Amino acid sequence: MVEKVIGSQLLQSTPREVRSSIYKINPIILNRWSPRSMTDEKLSYEELMSLFEAARWAPSSGNSQPWRFIYATRDTEEWNTLFNLLVDFNKIWAKNAAVLIVIVSKKEFEYNGKVIPSVTHQFDTGAAWENLALEATSRGLVVHGIAGFDYGRTRKDLDIPDSFDIIAMVAIGKRGGKDMLPSKFQEMEKPSDRKPLEQMVMKGRFKEKSG
Ligand SMILES: Cc1cc2nc3c(=O)[nH]c(=O)nc-3n(C[C@H](O)[C@H](O)[C@H](O)COP(=O)(O)O)c2cc1C
């Protein structure tokens, strides 16, 4: 792994220098990854809203837009509420994030004047999260998805109605040096690889390949 010093901080090389795709794709896709090291710098309100704006333009079934984002910025009362939902493992690194977000998704939508269950609401909300992640990546920010938190307490503490599924949390912040993490996290601070295309793409009918 190539490492370089930017300012006073030791940063890893960009993922694109480490990851490679077999077929040609937009570099932003390889550059999005999930670092854990963040400085405790804040994001401006405009920058944060730009990330939500990117999410807002995601496609969804019937344009139902089921995604909702509950956010908290550092050093606020809401921050403590969201931060305390995290499991200890995630608290260790997410404490330096600028923003925490809980993403929830509406389970039903109105179609032809009728309220019906949405089969695709989680898929739609996943598209919105990826829009947000790519926008953040293009701005050089860290954006890290989180499933390690207390889903039951989240519903209660944040007053989330049963008509919404709680999908995930996200930590966002300014990229910090790897040396700011405890040593066991430093080892994990590198872009991951992916299964080969042949294990996920099937022509014509389902055929399981090992992996
Ligand atoms: C929905 C979701 C939940 C995740 N939960 C956690 C988590 O609780 N803690 C953590 O450290 N990383 C978490 N991750 C990060 C994943 O481990 C990471 O995205 C995956 O290993 C792929 O690596 P990459 O994002 O660097 O490409 C989560 C990612 C997603 C999308």
Image (cartoon, helix red, strand yellow):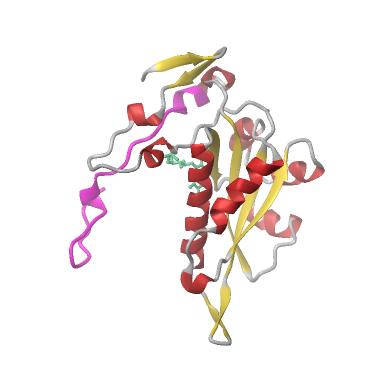
Please say if 62 is above or below 128.
Answer: below
Seen from this angle, which residue lies furthest bottom?
113
Q: Is residue 159 magenta?
A: no
> Which percent across, then down, holds residue 164?
62, 67
Please say if 84 is above or below 60.
Answer: above
> Which percent across, then down, holds residue 71?
69, 49
Q: Main secondary structure of the magenta part?
A: loop
| 23 left or right of 3 in image | left
Please say if 18 is above or below 126.
Answer: above
> Which percent across, then down, holds residue 125?
52, 60
> Which percent across, then down, holds residue 145?
53, 44
29 or 162, nearer to the observer: 29
64 or 108, nearer to the observer: 64
Corner quadrant of residue 39: top right
Corner quadrant of residue 75: top right
107 or 4, nearer to the observer: 4
Residue 14 appears in the figure: yes
Please say if 121 is above or below 24.
Answer: below
Seen at 67% across and 36% down, the residue is 43
| 184 left or right of 93 in image | left
Q: Total marks drawn?
A: 0
Image quadrant holding the N terminus, namely top left
| 124 left or right of 80 in image | left
Seen at 56% across and 14% down, the residue is 7
Residue 149 appears in the figure: no
Seen at 54% across and 41% down, the residue is 136
Seen at 51% across and 26% down, the residue is 185
Q: Which stretch did the figure color magenta?
A: 185-211
